[in-house]
Image (tube, grey):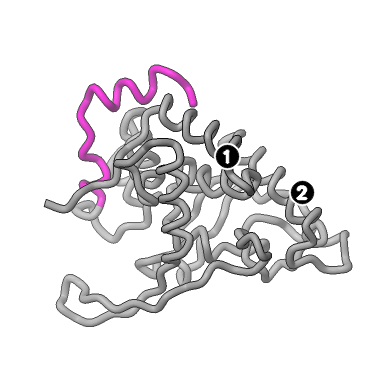
Amino acid sequence: MTKRAAVLLPSQLRHLLRVTETTSRHPERDVLILWLGFSCGLRVTETARLTVADVLLPSGRLKAEISLRAEITKGCRQRLACLAHPKLVAALERYIEWRKAKRFACTFNDRQYRGLNPASRLILTWKGGPYALDLKRTTNTAGEPVEYWAADSLQAYIKGLYRAAGLHLASSHSGRRTFASRLLAVGESLETVQALLGHADLDHVMPYLEVNEDTLREMFEVVV
C-alpha cells in the first residue's frame, strides 16, 4: 500500500508555523509556501510555477482568487484557488514587502504590480531566482508515456520544514491532503473537493479523504 502523507491537525499546523517562523532563515517566504498548500491545496510544482501576475492585479491589489493556468497544473486542467484565508492574505502581503526590500525581480515602475516583475515567479530561492523544474516521465492510466515537470528542490525544502518541526510523517503533500480533509470535515461534497483539487474523476480524490472520523472531528474543534 502506498504510504500517504500525514494530515495535520490544527495544533500541528500551529506548531509547524511557529517553528518555521523562529528557525527559518526566510520565514516570510516559507510561511507563505506552507499556507498555499494548507489553504489553497496547491501542489508543490504549482506553487513553484506561480507568477507575480497570478496573484497581483496591475494596480498592485491582491486578486481574490488565483486562476491556475492549465500549463502549470499536473493534469493540464485549469482551476481556481481562492485567496480567502486571512492568514494566507497576511502572509502574501508580508512576503511581497520582503521581496521588494530584497529587490528580487523588481522593475523601476512601482505603480504596477508594486514594482515586481509580473512575469517572474512568485516564490523565489534565497538567491532571488526561480526554483528549478525537472522534466520527468511516467505512464498514465491508459498505459501511455507522459512527461511532466516536478519541482524536486522545493519539495525537498518543504520536507525539511516539516522535519525541523518534528513532523516526520508529513511531506510536501501534507498541505494538499489537509486542505482536502478540512473541506470534508465541514461537509463539502466530494464533487467540490474534486474541483478544488483539480482531479479528473472522484477515484483520484478518495486517497486524500482516508482520514478517520476522530481525526476529522478534532481538526475543527479549534480554528487554525
Q: Are marks 2 and 1 in contact (CB under 8 Å)?
A: no
Quarter holding residue 10: top left
Spot occupied by residue 90 in the image (x, y as percentages of width and height)? 66, 38
Question: Would you place residue 65 above or below residue 110 in this image?
Answer: above
The local secondary structure at tag 2 comes to helix
Q: Residue at x 77, y 57 (%)?
A: 102
Crowd tier of the residue under label 1, counting other residues whose Cα lies within 10 Å: few below 14, some 14–19, many 20 or above? few
Question: Would you place residue 29 above or below residue 151 in this image?
Answer: above
Front residue (pair 221, 197): 221
Front residue (pair 197, 210): 210
Spot occupied by residue 64 in the image (x, y as percentages of width and height)? 62, 47
Q: Is residue 189 left or right of residue 78?
A: left
In the image, the segment drawn in magenta is: 205-224
Crowd tier of the residue under label 2, counting other residues whose Cα lies within 10 Å: few below 14, some 14–19, many 20 or above? few
Per the rendering, the mark at residue 23 is 1
- Amino acid type assigned to the residue bearing label 1 in the image: Thr
Per the rendering, the mark at residue 97 is 2
How far, Cα to Cα, is label 2 from label 1?
20 Å
Q: Residue at x 23, y 47 (%)?
A: 4
Q: Residue at x 56, y 36 (%)?
A: 85
Q: Residue at x 65, y 45 (%)?
A: 28
Name of the residue lying farthest toward the top: 221
All told, the count of numbered labels is 2
Spot occupied by residue 186 in the image (x, y as percentages of width and height)? 36, 28
Quarter holding residue 94: top right
The local secondary structure at tag 1 comes to helix
- Find out whether residue 210 is within the magenta segment: yes
Q: Nearer the viewer, mark 2 or mark 1?
A: 1
Spot occupied by residue 82 in the image (x, y as percentages of width and height)? 54, 46
